[in-house]
Image (cartoon, helix red, strand yellow):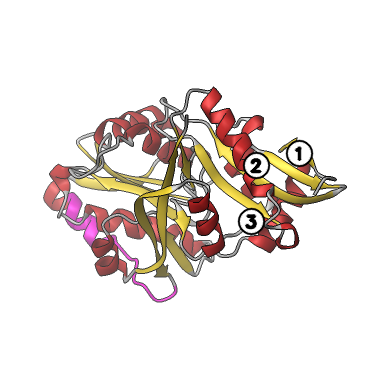
Amino acid sequence: MTDLDTRPLEAAYLPAAAALCRREIAYLPFSEAILQDRILDDPDFDPDLNPTVWQGERLVAMACGAPPSEELQTAGGVKLFAVASDVRRQGIASRMFDQIENRLASLGAGESVAIIAGNNRFMQGLDLRYTEALCFLEAHGYERAGDGMDMDVDLRNTPLDTADKEKELERDHGLRVRRLTMDDYQQAWDYVAREFEYPSALASDPVGRRWAYLATSGLKLDPPTLWMAEKDGEFCGFAVTDVAAPERLGPMGVSPEVRKLGVGTVLLKRALADLRARGVETGVIYGAGPYAFYARTVNATVNAVFWRLRKPLP
């Protein structure tokens, strides 16, 4: 196709971009507000990594990339792409990926990851239900480097009351759980960044500053969506919603010294109760780690499996 025009994504294109994503990408909600938050409001947004392709006045394709960030411990790569079904297999996606990968290489990135790039992500990797996208990525040189999952919780029928457990934690262990405010911003950032630099003994990559960014982003919402456990004025666990993705829970974590006391259960249920109070019927645990804990505690079930894909750059 020769009558195509490539332009960097800008706010004026969001209505067309949201419509394209709703038509071509299943399983995820798309609105102008979501695209604004996930793409343009990413603190590392780079116009050269976010091409849109137009046929006259019709938006036919878009791809969203993000640079690597040492500060927030995120990899560079592609976090979303969509091509109108009637113009696929004509090299449009390949040209967008070439532009993004060349830009990443010029910034010094040694690899491009899909679909788990940037700070404000859409997914924790490529949902395997997107078969055509998986085939494209593998043909374009991306290889599997890990996996993950999301889990669903039926908020209509899952018991979420924590009053008795909270009384027990305060009585027996001096622990309490509360919703934080912006007054707690710096203490919350410092705690999450320090405590969860490596979220588990098996983790090979640090995530503390990225989790701190996500956790404190919950303080900017109304009401704030960050719940924290504390003892003797020190934080010892957290859970947050609506920051990794809208109407999703995560990340969350509990300090080793208070694990197995039920702190995680209270934090989880408090956060899910927030979603239910807003009318959400199915809560999504984003990038669920200890899946047995979520299954046991709130009857969570796997709803999507992701592959994390990577491609070395020259």
Say what secondary structure mark 3 lies in: loop
Q: Quadrant of residue 294?
A: bottom left
Q: Which residues are magenta?
A: 156-170
State which mark lies toward you, 3 or 1: 1
For badge 1, the amino acid type reads Thr
Residue underneath mark 1? 6
Residue underneath mark 2? 96
Query: From the viewer's perspective, is residue 161 above or below residue 3?
Result: below
Image-based side of 245 in relation to 146, left or right: right
Extreme residue toward the bottom, this view = 157
**Residue 170 visible within the image:** yes
Residue underneath mark 3? 30
Image location of residue 89, percent across then percent down:
67, 57
Image location of residue 20, percent across then percent down:
71, 56
- Residue closest to the eye, 29 or 74: 74
Q: How far is disc 2 from disc 1 in space, using C-alphas?
A: 9 Å
